[in-house]
Image (cartoon, rainbow, N blue to C red):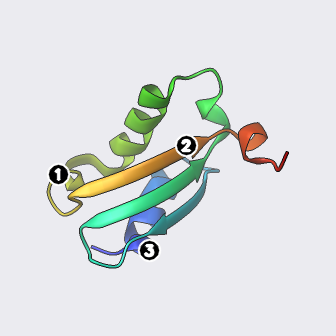
Amino acid sequence: MDADTIRKLIEQGLPGAEVEVRGDDGVHFEAVVVHPDFAGKLPLSRHRMVYATLGTLMGNEIHALALRTLTPDENRPG
């Protein structure tokens, strides 16, 4: 598994998302996902939306995924 594949899967599952994924060891990754549908949702709900795009890869090919989920407004500099 690689960061680019994870990025593409998240982008397919959340059309219009801005996604940045990092991870060099093939099993542990970090992602920043910006999407307007996160508005009004708690972090757990946002994370579940992202996990849903990855399906059974989570816990198998992807051992760990640290997430930062933001709306476009939250992503704008101060």
Q: Nearer the viewer, mark 1 or mark 3?
A: 1
Q: Position of residue 29 (x, y in %)?
A: 36, 63
Q: Residue 53: percent from the left, percent from the top?
A: 38, 47
Image quarter for residue 44?
top left
Q: Quadrant of the C terminus?
A: top right
Q: Amino acid at mark 3?
A: Asp
As drawn, the residue found furthest toward the front would be 78
In the rendered view, does 33 fall on the left or right side of 1? right
Q: Where residue 43 sits: x, y (%)?
A: 49, 30
- N-terminal label among 3 and 2: 3
Which mark's residue is nearer the viewer, 3 or 2? 2
13 up-or-down from 30: above or below: above
Which residue type carries mark 1?
A: Gly
Task: Give the labeled residue for mark 1.
Answer: 59
User: Percent position (x, y) of residue 59?
Assistant: 17, 51
Apparent side of residue 67 relative to residue 39 in the rendered image (left or right): left
Earlier along the polypeptide chain: callout 1 or callout 2?
1
Q: Which residue is mark 2?
A: 69
Dot label at residue 37: none
Return the residue at label 3: 4
Kind of residue at badge 2: Thr
Question: How far apart are the alpha carbons under marks 3 and 2?
Answer: 18 Å
Image: 73 above or below 11: above
Task: Judge the density around disc 3: few (<14), some (14-19), many (≥20) Cα neighbours within 10 Å.
Answer: few
Which residue lies most toward the bottom here?
24
Mark 1 or 3 closer to N-term? 3
Residue at left 24%, top 60%? 62
Asked whether the beta carbons under mark 1 and mark 2 sit within 8 Å of each other, the answer is no
Image quadrant in which you'd find residue 40: top right
At horizontal 78% and vertical 38% (from top left) the residue drawn is 73
Helix, strand or loop at label 2? It is: strand
- Give the residue at x 73% y 39%: 74
